[in-house]
Structure formats: C-alpha cells, structure tokens
Image (cartoon, rainbow, N blue to C red):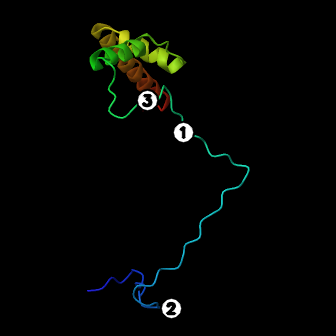
Amino acid sequence: MGNLCGKQSKDNFEGEGRTVGSAPAPTTKASIPSNVATPKPKMGGPPRTLGEGNRGDDPKAAAAAAAEARANRTSPGDLQKRLDAQKRQTNNQTLLQAANDNRLAREADQATETRNYN
C-alpha cells in the first residue's frame, strides 16, 4: 500500500548519466573573505617528546588541586550568590522556607477567591 499524502520519490536515473568509473562532478566550496582571519589553535606549555610522561605528577594530587581551586574560586553574579546561600541552608531551614512558600501560596489563592466573590 502506498502513501497517499507523501511526495513522489525522485528517480535516481533521471537526468544526465555518466559511465562507470567516471568521477562525480566537483562540488563548489564557498570562498572565505580575505578580511576574516582564521583563529590559530591555542597550545600552551613547553613542547614534549613522544612517550614522555607527566614527569612524576600524581593524578590524584592534580585532581585534588583542581577541586581545591574550584572550591576557593570567588562566585560572581547574583544568581551564584543565591545558589551558594541555598547550599548553606540546613535541612530545617529548607523545610521552613518550603512551609512559608506554601502558606503564601494559600493566602494568594484565598485572596483571589475573595476578590472573585466565590
């Protein structure tokens, strides 16, 4: 059974043909404007020879140093400050805040119901 709403498939044998073994037509590429500079890849550190290891660096120590640097980094932005304050909350403070939010929502619903004279 065929598809009633679909498009008719394109026949691969339409158009100009070519012989077996001949190369396909070359594709054209968009040229890059001369005023656009291509960025050079950034590579840091001294060059190393093939097979050279980490020169005694302990992977655990490097991971610990990176984690310490992330933990001691200053937190920019208002959103990050609020997130840090939320992380410092105790379980009891979190429950109190959730209860307060629920109470405020109930009061807002009650005020809406009173306004609508229901």
Q: Going from the N terminus, do you reach mark 3 or mark 1 first?
A: 1
The spot of residue 79 in percent (x, y) is: 50, 20
Number of the front mark, 1 or 2: 1
Quarter where residue 19 is shown: bottom left
In the rendered structure, find residue 16 and report the number of the disc placed on it. Answer: 2
- Say which element carries label 1: loop
Residue 10: x, y in percent?
43, 85
Residue drawn at x 29%, y 17% is: 58
Q: Amino acid at mark 1?
A: Pro
Rendered image: mark on residue 113: 3
Depth check: give the residue in front, 27 or 84: 27
**Crowd tier of the residue under label 2, counting other residues whose Cα lies within 10 Å: few below 14, some 14–19, many 20 or above:** few
Q: How far across and down, in percent of the image, does residue 22 sit?
A: 45, 84
Query: Which residue is rendered at x = 59% and y = 70% of the image?
Result: 28
Q: Are marks 3 and 1 in contact (CB under 8 Å)?
A: no
Specify the quadrant that holds the N terminus: bottom left
- Please, what secondary structure does the residue beneath circle 2 have? loop
Q: Residues within 10 Å of mark 3 (few under 14, many from 20)?
A: few
Q: Amino acid at mark 2?
A: Glu
> Which residue is outermost to the right?
35
Q: Which residue is mark 1?
A: 41
Viewed as shown, does residue 77 lie left or right of 86?
A: right
